[in-house]
Amino acid sequence: MTTRYRRLLLKLSGEGLAGEDGFGIHPGVIGGIADQIHEVHQLGVQISLVIGGGNIIRGMTAAAQGMDRAQADYMGMLASVINAMALQDALEKVGVPTRVQTAIEIVQVAETYIRRRAIRHLEKGRIVIFAGGTGNPYFTTDTAAALRAAEIGADVVMKATQVDGVYSADPARDPEAVRYEELTFAEALRQDLRFMDQAAISLCRENDLPIVVFDMGVRGNILKAVRGESIGTLVRDSPTSRG
């Protein structure tokens, strides 16, 4: 089976791990994610991941409720480490060797992020989960995903969401919202489309990193995206037909 991408970074939301519970980590959900990643890994694709911590705490939400923003962001980074460890466990249960690297030193449970070591893990067929965001407050895990993807020379950033692509407006609130099949980075920034924060989109643009936004809830979508099938929305500099 042919694949479009040799090395990818998959961005997962923490909220996606909670399932219908809305909080915490749902074993069935994380097991299903691990199965889908395993399916792609078997094709020889080098896979890295960044995962958020929103199922445990969201830094910006906590800050809006009165907590110090930097403190809240650090708590969010630690939440992402918890999620990374849970996903590592799920992946290793299906036989996929996995390493967690974190931007915050927690040597008892994860490797400290080292770019060259991460690349070496990928070359050896291991999945690498980047946790702890960028290690700095005021940056989202979207920006961490774009940064790590650029650093390791990924071919694409795959943004897993709970909707089937990028819309002109929130489809849950606006029935006339239009889904885009393709967008340029410039269009995404000019229209202030919120599928990722603007810093992350700009970083991908500067490093010629295409973004695929797709619905993680549909089983098999990761595999379809890796094969280059037309799912979700493709964001890049010069959109052409994906035929």
Image: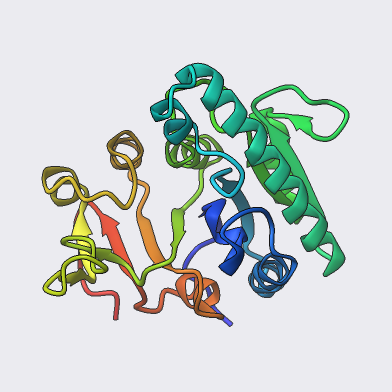
Image location (x, y in percent) of residue 62? 48, 31
Q: Is residue 15 above or below residue 66?
A: below
Give the quarter of the figure containing the C terminus. Answer: bottom left
Number of on-image labels = 0
Image location (x, y in percent) of residue 219? 56, 80
Residue, x 58% and y 43% (percent of image)?
53
| Left or right of 19, for residue 59 | left
Residue, x 82% and y 70% (percent of image)?
94
What color scheme is it?
rainbow
Q: Quadrant of residue 130?
A: top right
Q: Residue furthest front?
A: 65
Q: Quadrant of residue 90?
A: bottom right
Pick the front one: 212 or 45 = 212
Pick the front one: 52 or 10 = 52
| Left or right of 28, for residue 6 | left
| Left or right of 39, for residue 232 | left
Residue, x 60% and y 50% (percent of image)?
49
Pick the front one: 202 or 104 = 104
Give the quarter of the figure containing the N terminus. Answer: bottom right
Q: Is residue 9 visible?
A: no
Residue, x 23% and y 68% (percent of image)?
171
Q: Is residue 187 above or below residue 70?
A: below
Image location (x, y in percent) of residue 32? 68, 73
Image location (x, y in percent) of residue 207? 35, 38
